[in-house]
Image: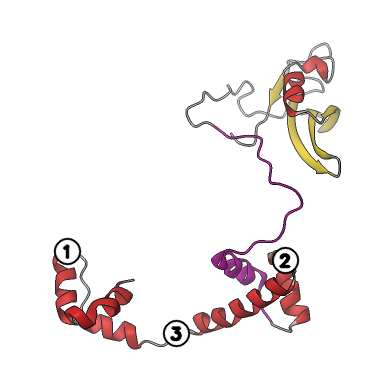
Amino acid sequence: MIVEFIDEHKELYGVEPICAQLKELGCGFAPSSYYEARDRKDSVRTVRDAVLKKAILKEYDENYRCYGARKMWLELRSGQGIDVARCTVERLMKTLGLQGARRGPVKRTTVPDPAATRAQDLVKRNFRPLAPNKLWVADFTYVSTLAGWVYVAFVIDAYARRILGWKVDVNDHRFGAACDQSSNILTLPRGCQGFVGINSSQ
């Protein structure tokens, strides 16, 4: 950034005066450092990245701007014969601001509030009960289907690691209200201490 700044203003002020002023401002940058940086050749990685970026942009436009990192990586390797790592393709696509097409809109159901009070840890992080029906764990998620978004809640026995019941609904508000009461999914058996809800955003 400093080299570009000096390049932009050196014709008007000169390299040495600019470096002297930068030093007074607490940003020491010697004229010799400027000339060294200006004359330094691009690294092998920088040169290769430039070539790969052109190939990625070409494939991205030719494929209707739909390819994500995985398909782009496969196309470069199999279709173009370019030996490149997948992580490199991901890095360069991120730098270029490219991303694959997504099926349907992006949905976010949970927006955590840093100031909100967190739910109490009723089991002290101990999810290993000594017998069945002593601790059930409840969670819910959402799934994109051809019919739209579907909301699913699960109840799992922490001892058996088995799903005991579930509830499905297409209305998130109605679904959330129903899940507030465990009886809407399953009836608590005798001896069960109750639910512990898990929220991945917390």
To which residue does mark 1 refer?
Answer: 25
Return the disc, 1 or 3, that comes first in the chain's sequence: 1
Looking at the image, is 5 positioned above or below residue 140? below
Q: Quadrant of the C terminus?
A: top right
* Measured Cα–Cα span from mark 1 to mark 2: 47 Å
Left or right position of 27 against 102: left
Q: Residues within 10 Å of mark 2 (few under 14, many from 20)?
A: many
* Quarter of image, res 6: bottom left
Name the residue rendered at 41%, 88% in the picture: 41
Return the disc, 1 or 2, that comes first in the chain's sequence: 1
To which residue does mark 2 refer?
Answer: 67
Q: What's the image's color scheme?
A: secondary structure
* Quarter of image, res 174: top right
The three-letter amino acid code for the residue at tag 1 is Leu
Q: Position of residue 125 (x, y in %)?
A: 62, 29
Name the residue rendered at 75%, 48% in the picture: 104
* Measured Cα–Cα span from mark 1 to mark 3: 29 Å
Q: Position of residue 92 (x, y in %)?
A: 58, 70
Looking at the image, is 181 positioned above or below residue 127? above
The three-letter amino acid code for the residue at tag 3 is Asp
Return the disc, 3 or 2, that comes first in the chain's sequence: 3
Q: Which mark is drawn over residue 42?
A: 3
Q: Of helix, strand and loop, which mostly describes the magenta segment?
A: loop
Q: Residues within 10 Å of mark 1 (few under 14, many from 20)?
A: few
